[in-house]
Image: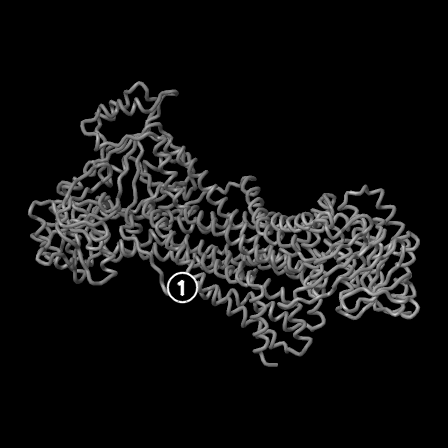
Amino acid sequence: MDNRPLMRFCLRHSRRHLVRTLLLIFGIAMGVAGVVAIDIARTSVGKSFDLSARSLVSRSTHQIAGTGLEIPQQVFAGLRTDLGIHRSAPVISRHVKVSELGDRIVTLLGVDPFSETHFRNLHLSPAELDLSGIMTGSRGVFISRSHARQYNLDIGTPLHIFLDSRRTTVTIAGFLDSENSAAARMLEGLVVTDISLAQEILEMGDYITRIDLILEGDGAAQKIRNFLTEGLFLVETDQQNAAVRGLSYSFETSLSAFSMLALFMGIFLIYNTVSFSVTRRHRLHGILRAIGATRSNIFFTVMTEVMVYAVIGSVFGVLLGILLGKGAVQAVIATVSEMYFPLTVSQTHISGFTIAKGLLAGILAAFVSGFFPALSAAGTRPVSLMHRTVSEKGFNRLVPGLFICGLLILAAAVLLMRTGTSHAGYDFTGLFMVFFGAALLTPLLIRVIVRILLAAGMGSLGMMVKMALRNITRSLRQTSVLMASLMVVTSVYIGIEVMTGSFRLSIIQWVDDHIGGDIHVSSADPLTQALDTDLVAKIRQLPQIESLSAYNIHPVFSRASGKVHLFSYRSDQSVKRWSWTAAPEEELDALMEEGWIFVSEIFAQRHHVMPGQGAAVTLETRKGPVIFPVAGIFRDFFMGGGRAVVSPGTMARYWGHDDITALQLFLTPGTPAEPVMETIRQMLDRQDMIEIRSGNTIKQSILAVFDNTFVITSALQVLTAIVALTGILNAVMALLLERTREIGILRACGTLTVQVRQLLLHECFFYGLISGIMAIPLGTALSWILIHIINQRSFGWTYDMVLTPGVFFQAIALSSAAALAAGIFPALAAGRTHIPTALHME
Amino acid sequence: MDIEISDIDKSFDDSGSRRIIFNRASARFPSGKISVIVGKSGVGKSSLLNLISGIDLPDKGFIQVGNHCISTMNDTARTLFRRRHIGFIYQFFNLIPVLTVLENVTLIAELDKVPQKTWRSQARTLLEQAGLWDRRHDFPETLSGGEQQRVAIVRALVNDPDLVLADEPTGNLDQETGAKIMEMITTLARKKNKTLIMVSHSPDAAAWADQMFSVDSRTLTPVDNDTHG
């Protein structure tokens, strides 16, 4: 038989059921859109990170840096005069905010115009200007040409640069330009000026951030190492860049996890829509087989039609995903900037790979979804195809086997994820297997739950309730696909809700433990971070103060992750959650005095310190690299490369800091914070060098930052809701179409329109209720995987999983409400059923 | 319950053109009598039953069922009237597959919130007469065609309707089973003094009928029972 008549028949059928055809396309499109949107967010973060980092990169092979991340400028002079190394350039680089550039964070790059020629090609405009032109005392800076256009800025326009709470005014001297569009984007992250003006703006005195070098051969490097005094060290530029790049990689990994979740949901949704689309024509295919269509005719026809819609849906999905992705990029970039590394260049990156991935996800998922129903349609005898109950009976026989397969797949997933490998691919495969395995359990679970509900007296609530429940098991082949999809979507909601809820609770606990003080006083002086000892003494004597934590924090260089923070506590009121690597808690003080250090989870992850194993890390000190034994790892959400706690003695011996940089003040009970803060302010000569904030303000700002971390997960939850509604609407419409004759019978027997609608809404409610119930264990497992595997490997932090009944009730309510909402339109339509037509339907 | 059909018109949209089924058709079906409607396929016999039961409405004319003009009632009123006063038996049984035999029989009574003790004894009596009481907890798919039709008959009679409509009740059964079913329907109808209107192709139907009508040329024409039989 020629396939063309069959294709014509299928297309005519689709045209006649336009709403369902559009829903099928929309279902595929939504699945693809989720994948593309999150992938765009992920790749854009990576791209923005690259551009932001590359904007600071020069042709240097090595860099001289200081343990305290600053070095005296005279080192540069010494290099040139004493060692004769001319291919060297002093650099100052610091993130500042510029109000005229829409309060964006940019890198203030201070360079020496005469040394720069070896390192960077800064194309300046107007062409007659060169960098030395800005040394005329005019406080001139160069900004990117595209930014100038975007914000309507011209030469001579004043710019206000903010560093923390301090403000400096400079003038635009010219523009940074490039004909290459990628390079032009990179320049958007920079404000370039002369090194002396940068020192003035940043109040750095005679200090610089680093010295860039172009060295050939190990001899020159060794000569420099011998030349450097304590606290200074030489690093290879590539190694340094890789450490910085690693910061963002963890966040991208977590986005990949969410991209995978979106993909799984997308696949389930597509499977749901396509399989319903195919199975609802079961009888028609049977008739065609009966009149002479071959198996291959049916298979080819079904698959061709599915693939046509898959391509259309995938193309729409990609377009929709691009729109959604563009919206998500800014939110994600803001999160990364807050938590890891200020992204001075934000680039929405839509790669061909992302588009191909989305298209492929849609087409492959549709192929797989259509393949088995098409195979089943093509391979069954015509007589049985025409009777729905026969195929249902066939499916019912498969149910126990599917359950066992599901259990085996779940067991394999657990084994895969317990292998301990940190490769993200294993985790994602394991995650997919968990979803797939759980989906195979659903037919039997549905049957059991329906029996339990009926036995529990649901049936006594009326004939309509009883019918609704029995209809679910009667069409198990189709309802199990619908409910498995709804279960997956609801479990993703539970997983994300439990993860974010647990994380937030841990953060609140951590903030209370670590930032428990009523008032925080810290240095905002970039040169001397120490608080004045007289000021500390005066504060200590204030009668309103019951106790205080005094500590010093200093950023130091780590080869593994760039910048890390060292803490030493003079007195500490904070409570830490420990996991030990080598020592019990009671020996804490003694170990610290012996030179052991304690590191945060993030620090441990970046430096590959494993709990339960004796470990050591190398840190750059004033005396060169020193290996420190790690006694314990503590739970910590302090970002910026992690932190290590050392004794005050170790801090003084190796980094030369014996100062106090911050205080946490605990007031006597009932004392309001604001008057005490005002008293402290009055003790200060220069208020902009000391930051005084209430504990509550700090807590709220920290929580706000961490809430931002999960902005992408919130977006995923919204996507979940849309996916749930779309998927169910299509499936419910298809299922209810099969009920048309039954509805006709009921109406003919005297069932009122409203009762028919109640029946269908009951049925939809039970779809949601049972799916919600099944989603609880799957969602709990997913949240465990997200917290203990994905998050830990992505971010390095752990937190306790907190399960609250409220989340489960919410999830059940969500799935029930989504199913009910999806049932409204079909129920209204069912109420309008033309009884004589329905009675003659098969 | 007398049924009076007065000058009804009925037409359907058939792929863009109007197909006229009835044109000024009239008939009277007396109370307690068995009336049989005959006619070729597609002439509108089933449509007539749909019109009498209020499942469908005439374009013009009136249908009086007892003291009620069913063709002027709204949908809810027609549905409730059908539920309380009309029993319907179909060619394809039309049982609800997810309900047991007993549940199928008592569905309407339950929907109408009739007290259980009232309908339960009636259902039991009828199911015992139909020889199906032992199978009351079985689902329709486990029954034979004849058994399913007997359940449908019990369902149609359980709420003691004044009017029973039967649309080719034996059309899907073998001759022997069909004869038994016909006997059951007519016996129950006569015993309970019901008005029975039955559409049938069966030549034996005339034997059960008190009066016959033929649907022909868009009207209802009385047929001499003896000549047809």
Q: Can you say which quadrant of the picture contains the N terminus of chain A?
A: bottom right
Residue A72 visible within the image: no
Decide which of A604, A97 is in the foreground and name it.
Answer: A97
Q: Please name the amino acid that badge 1 sits on.
A: Ile
Q: Can you say which quadrant of the picture contains the C terminus of chain A?
A: bottom right
Question: What color scheme is it?
Answer: one colour
Please determine whether, in this image, residue A76 is positioned above or below residue A282.
above
Residue A331 appears at what percent x and percent y?
36, 48
Residue farthest toward the bottom in the current orientation of the protein: A1
What residue is drawn where x is 91% and y is 61%? B210
Residue A683 appears at what percent x and percent y?
22, 24
Q: Residues within 10 Å of mark 1 (few under 14, many from 20)?
A: many
* In-image side of A520 versus A527 (left or right): right
* In-image side of A793 versus B199 (left or right): left
What residue is drawn where x is 51% and y is 64%? A365
Residue A278 appears at what percent x and percent y?
60, 66
Decide which of A426, B138 is in the foreground and name it.
Answer: B138
* In-image side of A265 versus A739 (left or right): left
**Residue on which the image places disc 1:** A355
